[in-house]
Every structure is written in C-alpha cells, then in structure tokens.
Amino acid sequence: MGVKTLYSNHEKFKYDHIYFLLINYFKFKEEMYGNHIKDVINILMESEKKGETIIDLTSESLLVTPIEAGWPLEHINALEKSLLINNKDAPFLIKNKKLSFIKWSKKIDNILEKLFAKSINQINKNKRIKLVSENKIDELRNLFEISDVAFLQGGPGTGKTTLIIKLILNFLKSDNTLNIGLSAPTGKASARLKESLEQQINSSQDIKLEKIECQTLHRWIYNSQKSNSDLKYKLKELDFFIIDEMSMVSINLIELILELLANDCKLLLVGDANQLPPINSCSIFNYIFKNIKHNKFQHNIVNLKRIYRNSGEISELSKLIFQDKKLLDHKINQLIKKKNKTNLNIIECENKNIPLSLINEITSHLNELKKLVSNLSKKDYIFNEKIDNLMKYENETITNIFNQLNSYFVLCEKNTGIWSIQEINKIILKQNDLSNLLELDEGIPIMCTENNHELGISNGDIGVLIGNNISKKFLFRKFNKNNQTVVALIEPSMLENIIPAIAITIHKSQGSEAKKVSILWNQKIDTLENTKNKQLNNFSIQNNYQQRLLYTAITRSREILDLYFLN
C-alpha cells in the first residue's frame, strides 16, 4: 500500500535507533505492529522537537500524519499487544487519554510533586480565596505567607517585570537580610530584568543592590555546582528565587533548579503560558496552565489581565489566536484588505521570493547600524585590550548602537528553506558560504548560539561585528566576572558558535522585544483536520504549536508589526 512507503525496508526510518532498541528488547511481531509503532515514535519525536512531550489522543490536530490508518485506537492496540504499555518495563505511557514516553511523564510527575510540596496546604486553601486582591503586590505577599511557591502569569504589557521588581523591594523593606535571586533562561531576558531592577533601586534610597543577584539559569546552576562561586550566592543560600520567562525553561533545567534550592526557599515562577515551550523538551509552566482544571495549583496562581502597554491591533490579534478561530480569520482578512497602514500590517504574497519591500527595509536598518558602528571603530583606542567596559568611555555611542541593533527584528520560522534565515542571509550578504564571519563587513549583527560562562555570554545574545581586516572583533553586551553588565570587544578566536543575525528564528527571539518586527510566515498546514476540510483560510492555524509560534512572533513587537504570509 502506498501509505506505507515511508517505512519500507528500502528507506531508512529516521528514528530507527529507537525502533530497533524496542524490537530487540520486546520481540514484538514486526509485520503486524511495526508500522503502528513507528507511527507512535515518529509522532512523539516530532512533537518533542516542537516542545510537546505529551500527545492528546482525543485531538485531531497532530504535527505529523500517521502512516497507518486507525489513529489512535489501532496504534493503542499495537502498543498493548507488543507490551509497550501497561507493562513494568514499558517505554510508553497512556494516562487520561494522553500518550507520552514514560521518561517525560516521570520527570513531570517528579517536578509537580516537588512544587506541590511548596504549595498551599489544605488548611490554607479557604484562607487563600479571601486573599485575592486587585492589588497584585498584596495578593502575592499574602500568598507567600501561606505558601512557598507562586505562579505569576500574564501576556505582554501586563506589567510582570514591574510587579517582580516592586515585590522584591517590598520584601526587602520588610526584611533587608533576605538573600534574593533573579533569573531567566536567556542572557537578554536576564539583562532586561537587571536593568529594570537597577533603575528602580536607583530611585529608592532605602534599598541596596548588594542583597540581590541576577543571572541566567545556566549560570546559577554552573556556579552552584562549583566549589567557588562567581556569584554572591549559590542557589541553596537563597531565601527567595524568581524565574522569569518560564515558558522557555526546559523540564531538565527546572528539575535541576529544584534540586539545588533549599527546601524553604520561596519560589516565584513568572511567564506567559501562551508562548513557545523549549525545543526537544517541554515547559512545566505551560503544562500546569494547560491542565489547570486537573492539577492542584489553582490557589497558587496570580493572573495579570490588564494591559498597560497599548499596542492597538497587535494586542487584539494576539488575544484572538487562542480565543476564537472565526474571529481570528475575520480579523486577518480585514487586515489583509485594508488600505491604510496601522501599527499592524498583514501582507499577502504569492511569490516565493523574499518580498522586495522587506529587503529594502533590512538594508536601510543595516546601513544605519553600520554608520553607528563606524563612528565607534574609527577611534583606535577602543581596541586596547586593557579596556574592559567601553561604556565607561563611549556611553552615548554604544547606547546608540545597541538601541539601533534592538530596534528592529526580522523573524523566520526556519533556518533553511523558503522564506528562511539562510535565504535572507544570501540576499543581504551576497554570498553562500558564511563559515568565515570575519570576511563580512563591520556592522553586521551576530548571535552567539551557545553559553560561554567564562566570557559571560549566553545562548541567544546578539552583538555586532566591528573593525576591519586584522582588527575585526565581536562587540557584545555581557556580564563580567563581578556580574556587572558591560560592553566589551571579544577576540573572535575566543568565541565559537557565532552566526549572522540579520534575521533570527521565532524561537531565538523569545525573551526579546523590538520597536518594529517583520515576520515571514510560511507555515505549511499538515494535520488530520486539514485533510478533512479543504475550505480553510490560507492563514488558518491548525494546532497548538502553530498558535504558540504565531503568538510568540507577534508579541515580540512593542509598536509596529509587518506580517508577511505566503499564499
């Protein structure tokens, strides 16, 4: 049968390494159940890549379509007959009509158990209901009187960061001996937190920064596992720990954090439960909110709904993504047809080439960035190796460079293919081989794709090329050994895994914002629901992953958004 050709003996199944482990151990009848089991592996692994480790068996929307007919009943039957479920050694688990690898279910259960141990006890539940308040600072303070964990959830512009800082100041005014830690999964998000904290503390005469440490999660873990820490505290020494951008935090990271924290440390988990989860894992934060009716944390949640940063139609569209499909389709069609520009423009394209208007805008942005970088690089003294923070000498010039660098983002779904980062790089840089970044002109944005604890640079940090010929360097905003934010020149030989950042993926944009964002949306729809309905709007979003992807991209914009979509 044609539908089975994907798993034929002549073509290698991409997850053969998993399949062969299972068949060698469980000795199931391959001719009867092999393709069903390959379907299950394929669906789970492809979903895991997108940050979903648990599959709802009642949903018709899957990221990949099964090859064998009869999903999910025939596949469940194959797992049962092959002893791959309902068996003490079974690698899969079906629970509450949801399918997963058992390793993920065990990790999730372990984390939920540890969080629940910090949660409100039965005696205090009625008391908690009485503590709900319009004043969210009071509500959080009251919540922490009866619980050691709280979840702060809200979309963009709802004041999460402001509330975090006010809560910290409030705690320290009550008890200035507290050891407080702040964190986020990316360097960009951590730096933004620290900047907000410093601004608030500078305006408060009573509070000093010495009691507070702010760093990335990876650096907290790295320093907590060392005998000598570069930070003020190790995780086990904290009285209060706050993690922002929780939707991005992987299962493995939060599991390790909970192991390293003291049992009585108060924990505030902050995020937007509609954003993308981490790839090749899942988000415990998103999981809790997705299953809120079936878990024990309802009384530990503070929701922020009021939007303080008005972004007009951007805010309206982001709400519709998860609320009403018909209203979303109507709104998108309305925006496509409108003639006058607003702060949100949807541009329908029928040509696979990158739109010329976008190329012109990228070129204009880069030209302005190159001018600003050139103003700095023409000053020879900045290349002196003894200078550890250029902000001390060229504050205004540096500020202008990073303001321009972060004023405009171009977001793509993928690194390769149609409307990809690779395609934009080829057009703008006019070359196919980008293996040697030092051959590029100064002023080109760059991104680090791996954490470098020694240099204080994190995965996802964006900098810029500066200098010419042998003097070419990387200019980055980073953390120094004293955990202070500095801007420094990095010798290229000291920092690997650097790529051009003219455009970045939607995943990599998480934790960042820009005044203007352009999105290239070329999302192919490949779901069970799509095969049944041929009359779908060309812009329809068919599954939870696509919803989160578009939502995350749209909400990176503070003011202006251009959304290009390929029809």
Image (cartoon, rainbow, N blue to C red):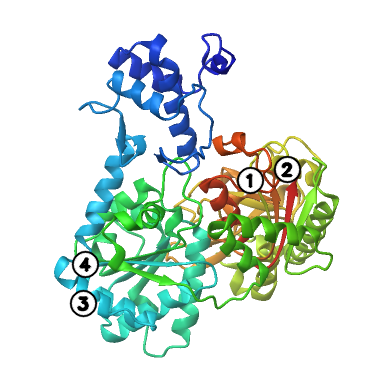
Three-letter residue code for mark 4: Ile
- Spatial CA distance of label 4 from label 3 is 10 Å
Q: Which residue, given by chain and number where applicable, does mark 3 sit on?
A: 127
Q: Work out which quarter of the rendered image holds the C terminus and state it.
A: top right
Secondary structure at badge 4 equals: loop
Q: Which residue, given by chain and number where applicable, does mark 4 sit on?
A: 120
Q: Which residue, given by chain and number where applicable, does mark 2 sit on?
A: 419
Three-letter residue code for mark 2: Trp
Secondary structure at badge 2 equals: loop
Q: Residue at x 57, y 58 (%)?
A: 324
Q: Which residue, given by chain and number where applicable, does mark 1 sit on?
A: 413
Give the label, 1 or 4, closer to the camera: 4
Q: Could you tell me residue 164's position as x and y percent?
A: 41, 74
Precedes in sequence: disc 2 or disc 4: 4
Give the label, 4 or 3, closer to the camera: 3
Q: Residue at x 50, y 19 (%)?
A: 13
Asked if labels 3 and 4 touch by Cβ distance under 8 angstroms, the answer is no
Three-letter residue code for mark 1: Glu
Precedes in sequence: disc 3 or disc 1: 3
Q: Quadrant of residue 209?
A: bottom left
Please rate how many residues cluster around mark 2, counting C-alpha atoms within 10 Å: few if below 14, some from 14 to 19, many from 20.
many
Please rate how many residues cluster around mark 4, counting C-alpha atoms within 10 Å: few if below 14, some from 14 to 19, many from 20.
many
**In this picture, residue 368 sits left or right of residue 330:** right
Q: Work out which quarter of the rendered image holds the N terminus and state it.
A: top right
Q: Could you tell me residue 319's position as x and y percent?
A: 57, 64
Precedes in sequence: disc 2 or disc 1: 1
Please rate how many residues cluster around mark 3, counting C-alpha atoms within 10 Å: few if below 14, some from 14 to 19, many from 20.
some
Q: Residue at x 45, y 60 (%)?
A: 245
